[in-house]
Amino acid sequence: MQQLKSLILEASTLGSNKPEVEAARMLTICNSCRYCEGFCAVFPAMTRRIEFLPADVNYMANLCHNCGACLHACQYAPPHEFAVNIPKVMAQVRKDTYIAYAWPKSFGSLYKTNGVAVSMAASLSLIVFLLLTLIVNGTLTSGPLKGNFYAIFSHNTLAIMFGAVFGFSVIALLIGLQNFWRGIAPGLASGGAVAEATHDALTLKYLDGGHGEGCNNDDDAFTLWRKRFHHFTFYGFMLCFAATSVATLYHYLLGLHAPYALNSLPVILGTLGGIGLLIGPVGLLYLNFKRNSEHGDATQKPMDRAFIVLLFLISASGLALLAYRDTGAMPALLAIHLGFVMGFFLTMPYGKFAHGFYRLAALLKNAIEKRQPNKLGLSGD
């Protein structure tokens, strides 16, 4: 017991303003206590180590789902002198990893003012598409065009504009993710590890607090609503992506061109996805405003909220465009929707959207690591 106390006291003197160092200090204390070992994947990963190098901290920070359960269970949490707050310090480290691994590297600074960047990108894109609609169509209203968006902008025009921006964003995101993957030295992935990581990501396994009752949001009461709203958002997005993919196949492979009937597969998928992207973001935004300030990094709230609001606006404008596509309001609604979508594409690699990919990479490393021999023999893996 005396040795444990000495180790904790030693760790408490390692404080630094740098999140990586502060995270290493807290993890050293947690590694001595281990009360939260069953909460999420971070704590078993912690027990496989006796020191926490920057690569280890970056990995575990992205493995953390910012659940908050460990903070409310911790006997060394503030106002204790050890001031252990894993959710907050991990959020700070995550932001630093996004900045460090962004490509091009100079664009990483966009994470520091991401709320402003997203707002500006969406606003400027909206203005540009409104002006383009005026130039091409001569007006923001028109007689009914039977839902034919290509009467305003041709298919090839939209494909080139959005394809170029989307292509760059995907490349930038993948290069940043590759840099992160190399940095955390994951090892070789087996089929089982890939399957486990995919399952954990798709089910948001670690947003259940480790016991299935949920995590904490604004107090020490458990709730599953954050997990549920994440599911609405994620699967709503995936349904919209599926709708776009199916429409692309219809266009190029089957020669079936938009507009599609209300009972067609692309419209059904898009409508269901749009509803999910209304419910999920509204719920997440509500929980974000109620959230305990000790659960995360306050400097990232603008990034979180801007991303949530942008997803909601994309969905709301898309559903409005579907509802009024046969009216004279279609050109203006099309411009508004395209503007919000372009704003999203422009900021994809440099905002909250990227966190899902970094977390998936961390989950995969965790699944790989669990299958490797535990040389320390310090945990139950």
Image: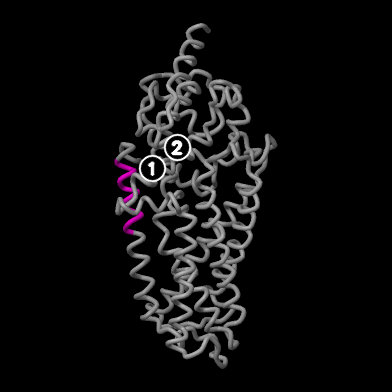
Using residue 184 as the reference point, say whether residue 231 is left or right of it: right
Image quadrant assignment for residue 206: top right
Image quadrant assignment for residue 107: bottom left
Q: What SS does tag 1 mark?
A: helix
Q: What SS does tag 2 mark?
A: helix
Query: Above or below — where is 318 with respect to 261?
Result: above
Looking at the picture, the colour scheme in use is: one colour
Q: Is residue 192 visible?
A: no
Q: Residues within 10 Å of mark 1 (few under 14, many from 20)?
A: many
Q: Nearer the viewer, residue 74 or 322?
A: 74
Q: Earlier in the sequence, mark 1 or mark 2?
A: 2
Image quadrant assignment for residue 333: bottom right
Q: Which residues are magenta?
A: 171-182
Location of residue 141 in the rendering, given as x and y in whole percent from the top left corner: 55, 88
Q: Which residue is mark 2?
A: 61
Q: Hey, what amino acid is under mark 1?
A: Thr
Q: Main secondary structure of the magenta part?
A: helix
Q: Which residue is mark 1?
A: 97
